[in-house]
Image (cartoon, rainbow, N blue to C red):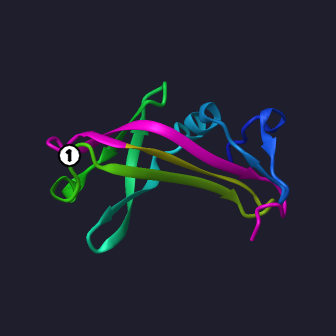
Amino acid sequence: MITDPDVDSLTAEADGRFLLGGAECSALIRTHRLGRLVWTETAGPQVRPVGYRSRLDGTEIMIGGGNLNTRLRAGQLVALQIDDLDLETAVGWSVTAYGRITRGATIGVLAVAVDRHSGTYWTGDGHGD
């Protein structure tokens, strides 16, 4: 079951999508535990599925680091993307949290201080594909 934001409080786009504000993005992030961590290296963009948890105020996300501690460093810019889609109704959302790593994976967990969020929500066929 998809978690729906309060559509009445959102800004509608011409293609039927709605822009999500920071509070909505933070709330949706807290409803899931699996996302994609994105960062860049010399070889280009890197994407890895990761387990995570978010502080209630949405200002910090803890990510299961595994062997990422050898690839990521404090201060590095990263993004965490989470989405959900109901295949029967074509209702869904996608949220990205952007921030910098505040501490390394010394205990197998990366901490990311969230600077900002962006997100979209769509209903029916308005998802722009």
Residue at x-position 52% and y-position 36%: 30
Is 46 situated above or below 50? below
Count how many numbered circles sit on residues in the image: 1
Question: What secondary structure is marked by label 1?
Answer: loop
**Does residue 32 appear to the left or right of 114 in the view shown?**
right
Q: Quadrant of residue 71?
A: bottom left
Asked whether 87 or 109 is in front, the reply is 109
Query: Which residue in the structure is indicated by mark 1?
Result: 108
Instruction: Report the magenta residues as a range.
Output: 100-129
x 19%, y 43%: residue? 104
Q: Is residue 1 visible?
A: no
Against 119, residue 56 (above or below) is above
- Is 111 colored magenta in this rendering? yes
From the viewer's side, name the closer residue of 84 and 96: 96
Dominant SS type (magenta): strand
Tell me if residue 40 can be seen.
yes
In the rendered view, does 86 fall on the left or right side of 16? left
Task: Locate residue 87, reporting x and y percent.
Answer: 73, 64
Location of residue 115 by image quarter:
top left
Three-letter amino acid code of the residue under disc 1: Gly
User: Residue reaching furthest bottom?
Assistant: 43
Image quarter where the C terminus lies is: bottom right
The image shows residue 56, relative to residue 86, as above or below, that is: above
The picture places residue 41, in percent across and down from the top left corner, at: 28, 66
Asked whether residue 7 is drawn in magenta, I would say no
State the residue at coordinates (72%, 45%). 19
